Image (cartoon, rainbow, N blue to C red):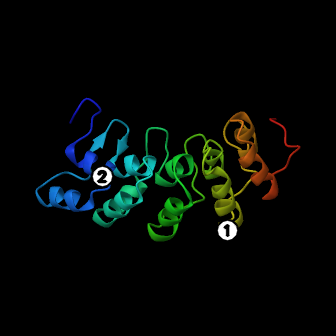
Amino acid sequence: MDKFLYTPLHVALINQNIEVAEQMVKCGADFRVKSGHFNLLHYSVIGYELKSVEFLHSKDPELVKELTLLGENAIHLAAKHADREMCRFLCEEAGVNPFSSNEMNSNVLHLAAANEKNGMELVEYFATEKGVDVQQRNVLLETPLHHALDKENVAVAEALLRAGANINVVLA
């Protein structure tokens, strides 16, 4: 591992060099290694590296189910950091439950509220297509709309309102 706690396999996957990653695994590289709080699949989701996620999922379908220290699985990380294509793969191909909540009882919509680049399309995917609850409250009684407004992500707030979020909900 280097100073960033990356193994050579991490580097191959960050660069989505699947041929090299495959050879490394054949030579004994551990694709289940954890670095800090995350496994390699978590890193690949956060880095928006779909080819690497697909590769790792083909090696071990259980990696998508592993939780971070905050109780987040791969779909939570994707909602926060990735795009619709990544989320679609995780839900429809890898079988990750889009209705799961993290340890704060936040759902994917709470997490998508922080996704500046792709949050709006993720609200449409999760709320409209998958039916994830736009009114779900976390342990702090916040809804996804509260999160979007707290993050000043107006596009996500508007998408949540279009999906049926209650504009008059109070923190009580």
In the image, residue 121 lies at what x, y percent? 65, 58
Query: From what the image shows, is residue 104 above or below residue 119?
Result: above
Q: Which residue is mark 2?
A: 13
Q: Secondary structure at mark 1?
A: helix
In the image, residue 67 lies at what x, y percent? 43, 47
Rendered residue at 73%/47% (across/down): 155
In the image, residue 100 lies at what x, y percent? 57, 55
Residue 133 left/right relative to 35: right
Which mark is drawn over residue 112?
none
Query: From what the image shows, is residue 141 above or below residue 122?
Result: above
Q: Count the marks: how many?
A: 2
Report the amino acid beneath label 1: Glu
Task: Pick the quarter of the image with the C terminus.
Answer: top right
Rendered residue at 89%/43% (across/down): 168
Rendered residue at 51%/54% (across/down): 75
Report the amino acid beneath label 2: Leu
Which mark is drawn over residue 129?
1
Residue contact between numbered discs 1 and 2, judged by CB atoms under 8 Å: no
Residue 153 left/right relative to 102: right
Q: Secondary structure at mark 2?
A: helix
**Few, some or many C-alpha atoms within 10 Å of disc 1 (few <14, some 14-19, many ≥20)?**
few
Task: Pick the quarter of the image with the N terminus.
Answer: top left
What distance separates the C-alpha of mark 1 from that of mark 2?
Answer: 30 Å
Q: Nearer the viewer, residue 59 or 16?
A: 16
Q: Nearer the viewer, residue 103 or 165?
A: 165
